[in-house]
């Protein structure tokens, strides 16, 4: 069994980042946090009590690249990503590995889909 530690973040695709920032930051009062510069993908990150909300602008140059984390998804922090991959393989669950560019300072992640096609990102700390 994969050992989940916490819900790390959820990704929310938006059509207008400026309007989304006003809603999540000014209306809901979520605290904006630093977001790495991600070439071609506009957005903003917020955090509440250790869980992040990643606003992902859908008018971006990466939208047609078939990277699951660019759309709606939930990210689960796991204890051991390599063990998670072994469990997925044993259970015959297809997954896609993704190694972010080094300049982002983020650890590799694994994307899986639940039975309804929703994207779940499995990750550890960088």
Image (cartoon, helix red, strand yellow):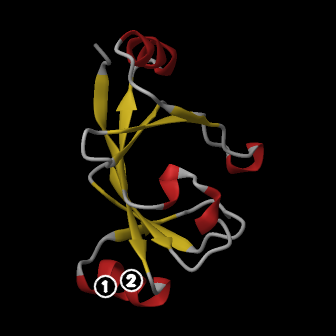
Relative to 61, is 15 above or below? below
- Within 10 Å of the Cα at label 2, are there few (<14), some (14-19), or many (20+) other Cα atoms? many
In the image, 120 versus 10, the foreground residue is 120
In the rendered structure, are the residues bearing label 1 and label 2 in contact, judged by CB atoms less than 8 Å apart? yes
**How would you rate the neighbour count of disc 1 (Cα within 10 Å): few for under 14, some for 14-19, many for 20 or more?**
few
Above or below, 1 against 76 in this view is above
Q: Secondary structure at mark 1?
A: helix
Name the image quarter holding the C terminus. top right
On the image, numbered disc 1 is attached to which residue? 23
Q: Image quadrant for the N terminus? A: top left
Judge left or right: residue 25 versus residue 109.
left
Mark identifier at residue 20: 2
- Decide which of 73, 9 is in the foreground and name it: 73
Lateral position of residue 27 relative to residue 111, left or right? left
- Kindly identify which numbered label has been placed on residue 115: none
Residue 70 percent across, percent down from the top left? 51, 59
- How much space separates mark 1 and mark 2, taking CA atoms? 5 Å
| Residue 33 or residue 17, whichever sits in front | 17
Residue at 57% across, 52% down = 67
Q: Residue at x 38, y 33 (%)?
A: 77
Residue shown at the point (64%, 58%) measured from the top left: 65
Rendered location of residue 95, percent (x, y): 48, 31
Residue 36: % across, % down: 63, 59
Up the image or down, 86 lies above or below 123; here it is above
Q: Residue 64: give x, y in percent of width and height.
A: 62, 65
Q: Nearer the viewer, residue 60 or 94?
A: 94
Based on the displayed image, in which of its 4 quarters is residue 71 positioned?
bottom left
């Amino acid at each position: 069994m994969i050992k989940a530690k916490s819900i790390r973040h959820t990704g929310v695709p938006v059509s207008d980042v400026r309007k989304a920032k006003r809603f999540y930051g000014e209306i809901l009062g979520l605290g904006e946090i630093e977001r790495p510069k991600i070439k071609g993908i506009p957005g903003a990150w917020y955090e509440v009590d250790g869980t992040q909300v990643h606003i992902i602008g859908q008018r971006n140059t990466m939208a047609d690249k078939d990277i699951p984390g660019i759309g709606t998804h939930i990210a689960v922090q796991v204890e051991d990503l390599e063990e998670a991959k072994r469990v997925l393989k044993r259970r015959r669950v297809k997954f896609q590995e993704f190694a972010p560019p080094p300049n982002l300072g983020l650890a590799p992640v694994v994307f899986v889909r639940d039975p309804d096609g929703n994207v779940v990102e499995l990750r550890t700390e960088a």
